[in-house]
């Protein structure tokens, strides 16, 4: 496991792979994008269950807790994510 400061940040969903259950969030608090797995999406999120995964929508604003960790080419990984608003009509999943 990596290191987390335990703080909650805000960001936006840049892409979401519905079929694979992961995506990327960008936050002005970090220079690097944040890798997100469906298992970290809060059940009280605006995300919905799709293909067995809790889903986020591209453009949605989120609250996120982050750790510094290596995940594929990413250096940041989400520990917890909750969608709090945004572009719900954007159902593009970038499959």
Image: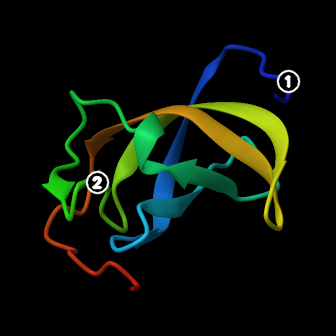
Residue at 24% across, 63% down: 87
Dot 1 falls on a residue whose secondary structure is loop
> Relative to residue 5, is residue 85 drawn left or right?
left
> Relative to residue 46, is residue 9 drawn left or right?
right
Question: Seen from this angle, which residue lies furthest bottom?
Answer: 95
Number of marks drawn: 2
Question: Which percent across, then down, holds residue 31?
Answer: 82, 54
The C terminus: image quadrant = bottom left
Q: Quadrant of residue 26?
A: bottom right
Q: Which mark is residue 3?
A: 1
Residue at 65% across, 17% down: 7
Residue 45 or residue 62, whichever sits in front: 45
Residue at 47% across, 55% down: 12
> Relative to residue 15, is residue 9 drawn left or right?
right
Q: Reading the chain from its start, which is encountered first: label 2 or label 1? A: 1
Residue at 51% across, 63% down: 23
Question: Seen from this angle, which residue lies furthest front?
Answer: 52
Q: Which mark is residue 53?
A: 2
């Amino acid at each position: 496991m990596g290191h987390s400061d335990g703080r909650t940040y805000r960001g936006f969903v840049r892409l979401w792979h519905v079929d694979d259950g992961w995506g990327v969030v960008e936050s002005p608090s970090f220079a690097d994008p944040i890798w997100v797995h469906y298992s970290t999406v809060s059940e009280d999120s605006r995300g919905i269950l799709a293909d067995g995964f809790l889903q986020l929508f591209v453009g949605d604003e989120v609250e996120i807790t982050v750790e510094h960790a290596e995940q594929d080419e990413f250096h940041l990984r989400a520990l917890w994510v909750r969608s709090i608003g945004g572009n719900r009509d954007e159902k593009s999943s970038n499959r």
